[in-house]
Image (cartoon, helix red, strand yellow):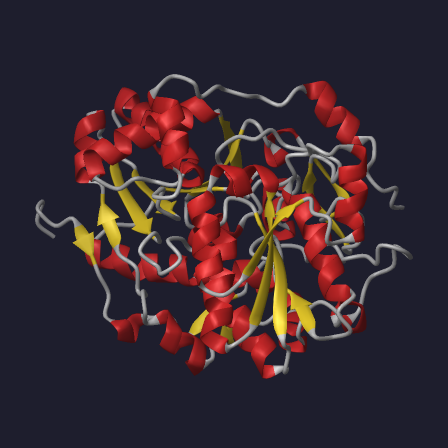
Amino acid sequence: MTESVTRFDLPQSAIPTRWYNIQADLPRPLPPVLHPGTHQPIGPADLAPLFPMELIKQEVSRERFIEIPEEVREIYKLWRPTPLLRARRLEKALGTTARIYYKYEGGSPSGSHKLNTAVPQAFYNKQEGVQGLTTETGAGQWGTAISQACNFFGLECFVWMVRVSYDQKPHRRSMIQSFGATVNASPSNLTNCGRAILEKDPHNTGSLGMAISEAVEAAATSGGKYKYALGSVLNHVLMHQTIIGQESMLQLKRAGDYPDIVIGCTGGGSNFAGIALPFVRDKLAHDKDIRILAVEPAACPSLTRGVYAYDFGDVAGMTPLIKMHTLGAAFIPPPVHAGGLRYHGMASIISELYDQKIIEAHAVRQLEAFTAARVFLRSEGIVPAPEASHAIAQVIREATKATEAGTSPVILFNLCGHGHFDMSAYDAFNNGSLADYEYPAEAIEAAMAALPKVD
C-alpha cells in the first residue's frame, strides 16, 4: 500500500454472514447464571418472560459461529461494512512512531455500533409475535438504535432513559421519539421500582441499574405482550457486535497490517467485544501476540476497582444473578458525560477474560478523555462520542510510550460512535467547567456491602 492510502473499504458482499461466539473458545466455560430467588442455575423457562427463545438459545450456545438471518443482513446493508481508517493525521499530530487505525461505527443510522444488535433483537422478537419491546438507555445511543430497529419491524418501543442523560441530551431523546418510541425519564412514576426510588429521593439522577429495573418490570408485567431488550452485557449482544472485528480483520489485511494492540472503551462491554473478540480468538487459538485493552471511566471503574462476584444487573434485584466485575448494583455513578459507560457491572464474557488475564483493563478520567477527543477531532475531523474518547485517550498513551521506546506498534481501536448529540459536554470542556471525578473508595465499599450472598 502507498503512504497516501487512508481509508480501507469493503464491498457489501463482505458483510459477515455469521456472528462469532467466543464461548466456543474460552479456556474455561462461563460461570452459570443463577436464579435471583433460589440461587440455582436458570433454564430457558426462567428467561422466557423477557426474551424470545432464539436469543435465549444464542445466550447459552457453545457453537463457534451462528448464521446471520438474511433479513438482518439486508438491513445491515444500510451502513455496513463500516470503514477502517489509518489515522495518519493523528499520528502526525502526536509525532508518534506507532501506526494507528480506527474502525468507525459512527456512520450507522443511529450514530453508533448499537444498531448491530438492535436489528437482530427486533427481528427475533418480531418472529415470535411480540407486540413491542421495553428497554433502558444511558446516553441514548442504545435507545436510538432500538427505536429504529423496532420501527423497521413494526414493533412498539418503550425506553426508560437515565434521568441525567434525559436532561443533558434532549436532542437524543427527540430522535428516539421521532422513530415512534415512548421515552420516560428514569426513575419514573410508571413502575413500582421507580416510585420506590423517587419516594426515597425525589431528585435522584438515575442509573442504568434503575432504568433496567423499570424496563424489566414493564415487560414482566405485560402479560406477554412485551419483551425486554438489552444493549450490552449479555452474551448474545456481544456476539452480534463481532461483525466489527471480523470486518476489521479483512480491512487490515488490505492495509498489509495486523494489530499489536487492540483498544475499546467499556461500560457494559458491547463495543469493546465487537472489535476485540475476533482478535481474542486469534490470541487463544493461533497464539497471536496481541495486547487487548479495555478502557473504562475512572468515575465508574468496574474492572479496575470492582470485584468479580455474583450480582444483579439492576437495582431492584429483578434480573438473574450473573458473575461479573461489579461495583455493586446499589452503586449510583456520578453524572459524567460518558453516559453509555455509567454501568455498575461488566459483561460476564469480558469479566472472565480479564480474570484469566487474557485482556488488560485501564481507567481514564473525564478531562483526559475530552483532551484526547479534542486532539482527535482537530486532526481527523470527526467529533467522537465521550464514550469512545476514553479509547482515544488510551491510544494516545500507547502511542506516546511507543515513541519514547522507539517502537512502531500497530494500534487498532473502535471509534464506536459520533458525538454530535454531546456538544453540551464539549461546551463544558471548552469553557473550563468540566471536572474530573474519581469515585471514592468508601462509596464503592458501601455499594459492594450490599452484594448478594452466593455460596
| Left or right relative to 39: residue 133 | left
Residue 65 visible within the image: no
Q: Position of residue 343 (x, y in %)?
A: 62, 41
Question: What residue do we see at 36% from left, 35% from top?
Answer: 423
Residue 85 visible within the image: yes
245 vs 344: above or below: below
Q: Which of 165 and 243 is in front in this view?
A: 165
| Left or right relative to 63: residue 280 | left
Question: What residue do we see at 42% from left, 36% from top?
Answer: 386
262 vs 389: above or below: below
Q: Which of 56 and 381 is in front in this view?
A: 381
Quadrant of res 231 = bottom right
55 vs 168: above or below: below
Question: What residue do we see at 57% from left, 79% from top?
Answer: 126
Q: Where is residue 445 in the image (x, y as percent from the top left)?
A: 76, 25
Q: Which of 94 and 344 is in front in this view?
A: 344
Q: Position of residue 258 (x, y in %)?
A: 30, 50
Q: Where is residue 77 in the image (x, y as percent from the top left)?
A: 32, 72
Quadrant of res 305 = top right
